[in-house]
């Protein structure tokens, strides 16, 4: 009877894969959402490091790391895991994280999404990527495949951790057996940070691809072109403004409304990242294929 009760309690302490996925989704929102906010206000790291070496980098990865480390230190869980009432514990002993595991967990939570996003952005905008960048992208594909396998094994109760990262750190996710011991001001501060989750989800909604086409896609509309400048760059009807030939595989830019050949606009976008006529910044998601009826 006692053993059966103990087994039943252990099973109840194991979160479902849906709760784990929801926590990971919330964690993955932090970096891109903060990037949008900091870019809007023009906040970046910009300082002289040594000699002629100057550091110009985003501020959002540093803030993301501090936020994750704070939650791992106080609640033994990431921001998203704490929001869904989960806690990281040692797989073998069930103990909470030590200082080394807290630091490594916060670093991996911040570094992996940051590096992957940087590599994919550079690969989409440039053809001349380095060989090591291509190899890193392949490694991320391998990691994602390995994570899918771990998730399946966790789903069928064959593995104690849902991720290769958790397995490497000898960690697993559990429901806490008792609420975290925090002083009043720490509790209030962390609760206020959790309200940030709704703001992050709003930022993600605002910048989603479908919504960008409805409301314009940016928090600040670009300045209109001067009429004289617009007339000088106006293409002839039925011609591509880039190659000045008849349109082939007509593709419209949702930001400016101009129509280009698919090959021409994609090639231009990889090199310049803007609309060839209006010079408004655009991405591959702003291109819409036009089909004849």
Image: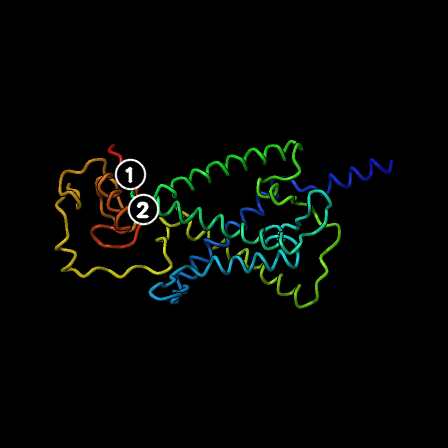
Graded by Cα atoms within 10 Å as few (under 14), some (14 to 19) or many (20 or more), the crowding at tag 1 reads some
**Quadrant showing the C terminus:** top left
* Residue 46, picture quadrant: bottom left
Q: Which of 62 and 16 lies nearest the eye of the viewer?
A: 62
Q: Residue furthest right?
A: 1
Task: Tell me, yes or no, whether the two marked residues, 2 and 1, touch with CB atoms within 8 Å.
Answer: no
Residue 250 screen position, x and y as percent? 23, 38
Q: Position of residue 164 (x, y in %)?
A: 57, 40
Question: In the image, what residue occupies the spot 26% across and 35% down?
Answer: 291
Q: Secondary structure at mark 2?
A: helix
Q: Would you name the residue on which mark 2 appears?
A: 125
Residue beneath disc 1? 289
Q: Is residue 38 left or right of residue 183?
A: left
Mark 2 surroundings: few (<14), some (14-19) or many (≥20) residues within 10 A = some
Name the quadrant containing residue 292.
Answer: top left
Q: Nearer the viewer, residue 224 or 59?
A: 59
The vertical placement of 291 against 276, above or below, is above
Q: Position of residue 221 (x, y in %)?
A: 32, 59
Is residue 17 placed above or below 80 in the rendered structure?
Answer: above
Q: Position of residue 98 (x, y in %)?
A: 67, 54
| Residue drawn 48% across the image and 48% down it | 113
Toward the front, the furthest residue is: 51
Q: Earlier in the sequence, mark 2 or mark 1?
A: 2
3D distance between C-alphas at marks 2 and 1: 19 Å
Q: Quadrant of the N terminus?
A: top right
Residue 262 is labelled as none
Residue shown at the point (84%, 36%) measured from the top left: 3
Q: How is the image coloured?
A: rainbow
Where on the picture, by quarter, is residue 288?
top left
Q: Give the structural element (helix, strand or loop) at label 1.
A: strand
Mark 2 or 1: the one toward you: 2
């Amino acid at each position: 009877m006692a053993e059966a009760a103990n087994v039943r309690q252990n099973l109840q302490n194991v979160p479902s894969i849906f709760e784990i996925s929801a926590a990971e989704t919330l964690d993955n929102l932090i970096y891109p959402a903060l990037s949008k906010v900091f870019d809007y206000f023009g906040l970046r790291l910009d300082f002289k490091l040594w000699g002629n070496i100057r550091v110009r980098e985003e501020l959002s990865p540093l803030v993301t790391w501090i936020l994750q480390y704070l939650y791992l230190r106080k609640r033994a869980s990431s921001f998203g895991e704490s929001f869904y009432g989960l806690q990281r514990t040692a797989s073998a002993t069930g103990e909470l994280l030590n200082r080394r595991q807290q630091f490594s967990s916060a670093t991996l939570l911040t570094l992996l999404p940051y590096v992957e996003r940087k590599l994919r952005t550079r690969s989409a905008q440039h053809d001349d990527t380095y060989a090591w960048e291509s190899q890193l992208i392949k490694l991320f594909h391998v990691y994602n495949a390995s994570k899918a396998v771990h998730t399946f094994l966790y789903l069928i109760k064959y593995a104690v951790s849902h991720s290769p990262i958790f397995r490497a750190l000898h960690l697993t996710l559990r429901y806490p057996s008792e609420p975290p011991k925090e002083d009043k001001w720490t509790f209030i501060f962390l609760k206020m940070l959790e309200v940030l989750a709704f703001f992050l989800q709003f930022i993600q909604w605002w910048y989603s691809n479908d919504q960008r086409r409805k409301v314009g896609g940016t928090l600040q509309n670009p300045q209109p072109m001067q009429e004289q400048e617009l007339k000088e760059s106006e293409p002839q009807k039925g011609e591509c403004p880039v190659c000045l030939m008849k349109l082939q595989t007509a593709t419209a830019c949702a930001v400016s409304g101009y129509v280009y050949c698919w090959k021409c606009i994609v090639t231009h976008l990889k090199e310049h990242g803007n609309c060839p006529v209006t010079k408004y910044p655009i991405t591959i998601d702003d291109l819409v294929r036009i089909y004849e009826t």
